[in-house]
């Protein structure tokens, strides 16, 4: 039976990516060797790295003065590396979830952190508005898509101080005005590549303004100078990222991704609202994530949560269980998820409703 992959991360990748990685594991670029067995300094891999960086720039229309880095450590390492490089005295953070909370905790190791607003009072089910960003902060940090709760900041905001964003789970899902940010980072395993590679887009002129000593490998200037080759980069995940970038370009770029992602999420939200059994967890439409859609059982039907999950699983739906801190269900609709998978999930929801309600 066909499986429909709604996992939140690691998550679905284009078949194009998976197939080309399989091929490169056997014979990479006609070298007669596996991508897993070649030097990262080989001409063939250097080309992969450079191509991935240039396509990333092209797809997001990244302006001059920015660099694209591919490093290890995951987004969680960036929670530390960002303040190490950018915070002299003080930073400001918006707390929209568990990942933002973790980023805040790390930033506090390096100076004063002002949390300008938090949605923790309602289990992060909304995006705070109307807060004030202190203009003496060295930067303001946001998490654009809150993977666990299904909220998203879908517009690129104007901030009075340099803006930094964790875009782990919505990168390349929409056009981004990169010029509004000084730094964007994320783990690749939600919308780009297998786990193991982390992307960083950084504006070079914001670096070098802190007094502290930065370990060489964590100094962004090192990775910029060395073209992300200061040490051995995650070779296979970078190759996979390149395949996904090529696939995005071949399929109309980030504008086309956004159009398709909006179509998928609005179809699913419509069904959640129509279906007697379910209610969405995010009430405010404006705050709803296009990438991760969360819902729970209508109270009246609470006892049907487990049976619905079992029913959906039998029908080939994978990864629709909500995060343990929210409960209910979550469907992640990353770029590579076909519209047909959303339609299949909707069919399952309707069929279950007709059996039970
Ligand atoms: C998954 C996720 C992270 C954590 O990424 P790692 O690469 O596992 O460290 C951080 N932020 C967001 C928004 C995420 O979705």
Image (cartoon, rainbow, N blue to C red):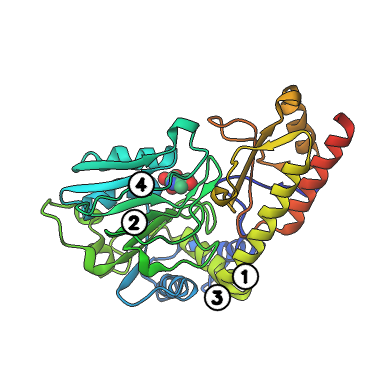
At 25% across and 54% down in the image, what residue appears? 218
Label 3 residue SS: loop
Q: Which residue is mark 1?
A: 256
Q: Are marks 3 and 4 in contact (CB under 8 Å)?
A: no
Please report whichever mark, 2 or 1, sits nearer to the chain's N-terminal start: 2
Label 4 residue SS: loop
Q: Is residue 25 above or below residue 343?
A: below
Residue furthest front in the image? 130
Q: Which residue is mark 2?
A: 164
Which marked residue is nearer to the observer: mark 2 or mark 4? 4
Give the CA separation, mark 3 to mark 4.
Answer: 55 Å
At 40% across and 68% down in the image, what residue appears? 178
User: Mark 2 packing: few (<14 Cα in 10 Å), some, or many (20+)?
Assistant: many
Give the CA separation, mark 2 to mark 1.
Answer: 25 Å
Q: Is residue 122 above or below residue 316?
A: above
Which marked residue is nearer to the observer: mark 1 or mark 4? 4
Q: Which residue is mark 3?
A: 30
- Residue 222 lies in what quarter of the image? bottom left
User: Mark 4 packing: few (<14 Cα in 10 Å), some, or many (20+)?
Assistant: few
- Residue 105 lies in what quarter of the image? top left
Please report whichever mark, 1 or 4, sits nearer to the chain's N-terminal start: 4
Which marked residue is nearer to the observer: mark 3 or mark 2? 2
Q: Nearer the viewer, residue 288 or 149?
A: 288
Picture coordinates of residue 317 (x, y %)?
Answer: 74, 43
Label 1 residue SS: helix
Q: Nearer the viewer, residue 184 or 22?
A: 184
């Amino acid at each position: 039976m066909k499986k429909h992959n709604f996992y939140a991360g690691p998550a679905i990748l284009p078949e194009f990516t998976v197939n080309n990685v399989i091929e490169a594991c056997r014979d990479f670029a006609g070298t007669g060797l596996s991508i897993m067995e070649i030097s990262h300094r080989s001409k063939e891999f250097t080309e992969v790295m450079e191509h991935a960086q240039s396509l990333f720039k092209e797809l997001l229309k990244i302006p001059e003065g920015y660099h694209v880095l591919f490093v290890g450590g995951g987004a969680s390492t960036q929670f530390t590396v960002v303040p190490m490089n950018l915070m002299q005295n003080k930073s400001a953070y918006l707390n929209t979830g568990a990942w933002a909370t973790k980023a805040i905790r790390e930033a506090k190791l390096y100076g004063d952190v002002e949390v300008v607003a938090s949605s923790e009072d309602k289990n992060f089910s909304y995006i705070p508005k109307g807060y004030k960003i202190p203009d003496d902060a060295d930067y303001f940090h946001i998490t654009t898509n809150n993977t666990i709760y299904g909220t998203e900041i879908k517009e690129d905001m104007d901030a009075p101080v340099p803006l930094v964003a964790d875009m782990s789970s919505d990168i390349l899902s929409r056009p981004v005005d990169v010029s509004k940010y000084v730094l964007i980072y994320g783990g690749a395993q939600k919308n780009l590549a297998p786990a193991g590679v982390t992307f960083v887009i950084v504006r070079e002129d914001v670096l070098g303004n802190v007094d502290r000593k930065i370990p060489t490998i964590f100094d962004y200037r090192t990775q910029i100078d060395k073209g992300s080759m200061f040490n051995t980069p995650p070779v296979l995940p970078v190759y996979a990222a390149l395949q996904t970038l090529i696939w995005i370009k071949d399929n109309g770029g980030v504008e086309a991704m956004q159009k398709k992602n909006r179509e998928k999420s609005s179809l699913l939200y419509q069904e959640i609202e129509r279906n007697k059994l379910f209610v969405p967890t995010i009430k405010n439409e404006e705050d709803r994530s296009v990438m991760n859609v969360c819902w729970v059982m209508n109270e009246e039907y609470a006892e049907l949560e487990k049976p619905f999950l079992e029913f959906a699983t039998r029908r080939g739906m994978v990864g629709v269980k909500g995060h343990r801190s929210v409960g209910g269900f979550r469907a992640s609709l990353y770029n590579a998820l076909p519209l047909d998978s959303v339609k299949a999930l909707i069919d399952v929801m309707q069929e279950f409703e007709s059996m039970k309600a």
